[in-house]
Image (cartoon, rainbow, N blue to C red):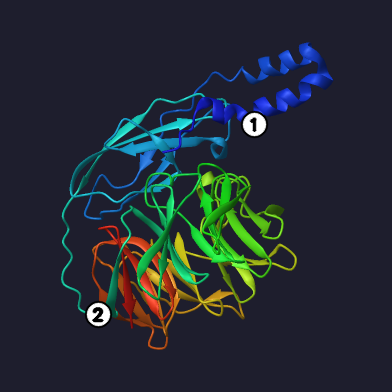
Amino acid sequence: MQQLTKAALCAPAAAVLAGLAGGLGASATYGMRAASSRDKTPPSAPTVQGPRRTSNHAPSFRFRSRDPDNPAGKLHYRCSFDSRHLHACAPRYRQRLKTGKHLLRARALDPAGNRGRPTTVVIRISAGTPPPPKLPPAGRITATVAVGHPLGPLAAGESAVWVENRDGTVSRIDPGTNTVVATITTPFVLSGGVGGWIVTGAGSVWISNYGANSVTRIDAATNHVVATIPVGANPTGLAVTPGAVWVANHHGRSLSRIDPAMNAVVATIPVGDQAAPVEGGPQELAAAGGSVWLEALEASGLMLERIDPATNAVMAKIPVGGFCEYGTDGATLWAGCLDERKLYPVDLATSALGTPIALPLPPFSLGVGLGAVWAVDLGPGGLVRFDPAASKPVGQTPFAATGGLALGYGAVWAGRGDQKVLRIEP
């Protein structure tokens, strides 16, 4: 697991000082170093918002800390369950947990490397066995692919199904043989929890590195890492449009536009209220109807925002009731909102939400295709199939889902907790 050290946190400042040393002289440089060292005050011990007792095996928690010398958006967090070894965490954090008692530790760090006191809370997970599903199966499981690595998100495209594993590797599945044909080592390991983002396009596979402020590009023809591209602070969601790869910078409250021909960021677009808490930064992305869509916190609340790739400008804002996941087939867009447990169609012509459908499970990933909308959770609910025409769920296949979901090659692909990927055909 990559470490977030004090030296790493101070690296940008050190680089600036080194660059200025020749022009300003030793005394001026020393003065700058003295000024940068004045911040000796650590952030407060973070408050932890979230359930203390729950039957949800992937509960969500939010960390909040205060610092007299830095705004909330400049603070970083490290956390862990049942271990004294802390890893980099997003302010909004989820992790799959077994039934029983767990110890969550969290600590805040500021840009100067000052570490606040840790907060420790006890979380109890009950069995919470769900009742048998009342729906017929969502589809037929036609293959089970052993990956042999802890599974993260999935993507389909460039002649394969791709799995971003939680140990810093990417597995390539051949949909023709339903076997893993390559395992690719990437520069960074996924931060703890259940996050992770992967997308295909422009002849490549793209993954965001939340703790390293970068995006890694894998050439789908050679299975080799060919570039690691610096982006904004704590990148998350990814989307591809013709001639561009888009990255949501969660802590940066911005959207980076990468030119795949240059392997470089060519535009950075501020989104949301720049003074809002860092938790409101963009996270999920989708490309639909010739636009890029993301969720950001404005002064008036959470908004689904529409970006015009021709101008890099926000062209519409739609109020949403809470954090949502987004799924698209390019021509349609759906929002699965966790807090409301509702699935909304998005009208691309009017930039408005349509009539919602009740969700039988909290969606962690959405997919659109094969005549349906699909959702997976983190837990035993597995996969649910929705009929857009009937506006209701029409099938469910229970299994211990890891949250990964992709559609392609005539099938739905979903991660299971035993490090296997299921191929499910309607």
Q: In which quarter of the image is residue 399?
A: bottom left
C-alpha distance separating marks 2 and 1: 53 Å
* Quadrant position of residue 71: top right
Relative to 32, 418 lies left or right = left
Residue 376 seen in this snapshot: no
**Which residue occupies the foreground of this view, 260 or 110?**
260
Residue 405: % across, % down: 39, 67
Q: Which residue lies furthest to the top in this view?
A: 27
Q: Is residue 207 left or right of residue 383?
A: right
Q: From the image, tell me which residue sits under label 1.
A: 12
Residue nearer the viewer, 71 or 164: 164
Q: Position of residue 397 (x, y in %)?
A: 25, 74
Q: Which mark is residue 137?
A: 2
Identified at 68% across, 17% down, the residue is: 33
Going by the numbered disc 1, the residue's amino acid type is Pro
Q: Which residue is drawn at 59% across and 27% down?
A: 10
